[in-house]
Image: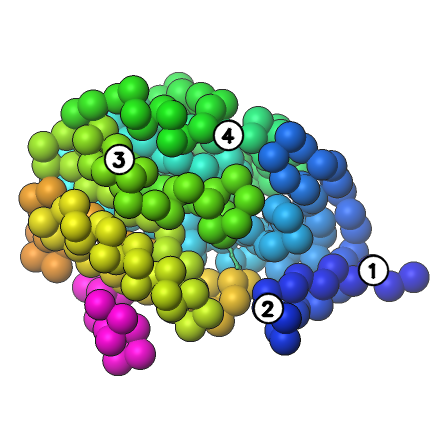
Amino acid sequence: MELILTEKHTDGYSVNWKIKETLHVEQTKYQHLAIVETYEFGRALVLDGIIQTTVKDEYMYHEMIALPALMTHPNPQKVMVIGGGDGGTIREVLKHPAVEQADLIEIDERVILACQKYLPEISCALTDSRVRIFVEDGIEYVQRHKDKYDVILIDSSDPIGPATNLFHESFYKNVYEALKIDGIMVCQSESPLFNRELLGNVHKSVKNLFPITRTYLATVPTYISGFWSFTMGSKQYDPLNAEIPLDVVNRLKTKYYNADIHKGAFVLPEYVAELF
Ligand code: AG3
């Protein structure tokens, strides 16, 4: 029997994944959660029917949500990751030698537990002694923390289901306040082709709050359109003028990010630049 996962992106566009094995399926309090073994991309985390990350290309997304901000900040000691229960973003954060504390705020504990069981190469860093895990709504967590973090990364799922409110300006305002005076935030801001209005709105909301706002792109083959956007809000440091510490970068053991990618990612094609 052939097992196919049909990932529905729009009414007119779906992607079919041939599945070797379904390792885990459950309806959690917040969403439908599955871990499957695909033929082309290895194991994958699927939330509400949408592929969140696969073993084959996860590093592209996780390096690129984390490292541009960490390399722009001269001394990122305290970092918060909102969402990202699979642990991939935390793994990248911990590569930076300055990081002393990395807090993961994930609303759905079932995601963390399933990824720890079935996706060890992604979730491995969650047991590091610098990591604190809070199973809580990120919206409430940021409200209670002021002037505490150097970098905050918002590794959410799409703006439907449990992540909807993570794309609102009122939330970014609380993120702004949870950051120290020279803090930096990055959120994943969806596909520059399929979520154009959303990306335009995210950029505008971040710009209303942060003096420096930069959207950048990375290829993530398993996400709709192949290109993915990230939006950075920074209180002081501009990623375009960052003095990237080459000695640190060269020791990171990355597979995507390097000092040239850091610069190149912020160069936007016209169809994206026109949104801002
Ligand atoms: N978070 C972003 C996944 C977005 C996928 N959306 C889509 N293909 N429409 C991934 C979490 C990985 N840590």
Alpha carbon of mark 3 to alpha carbon of mark 4: how far?
A: 16 Å
- Label 2 – label 4 distance at C-alpha: 26 Å
Q: Residues within 10 Å of mark 1 (few under 14, many from 20)?
A: few
Task: Between residue 255 and residue 80, name the one nearer to us.
Answer: 80
Residue shown at the point (39%, 35%) measured from the top left: 82
Looking at this view, name the residue that lies furthest to the bottom: 270
Mark 4, residue position: 107
Upstream in sequence: badge 2 or badge 1: 1
Identify the residue at image location x=10%, y=36%. 182
Mark linked to residue 10: 2
Q: Earlier in the sequence, mark 3 or mark 4?
A: 4
Q: Which of the two labelled residues, at mark 3 and mark 1, occupies the earlier sequence position?
A: 1
Residue under the image location 78 percent in, 56 percent down: 20
Q: Amino acid at mark 3?
A: Val
Identify residue type, mark 2.
Thr
Mark 2 or 1, which is nearer the eye?
A: 2
User: Is residue 244 visible in this depiction of the protein?
Assistant: no
Q: Secondary structure at mark 1?
A: strand
Task: Specify whether tag 2 is near ligand 1 (CB below 8 Å).
Answer: no
* Image disc number at residue 3: 1
Q: Is residue 177 above or below residue 228?
A: above
Task: Kindly check if marks 4 and 1 are in contact, taking CB atoms under 8 A apart as contact.
Answer: no
Instruction: Identify the residue position indicated by label 3 in the image.
Output: 175
Rendering quarter of residue 133: top left
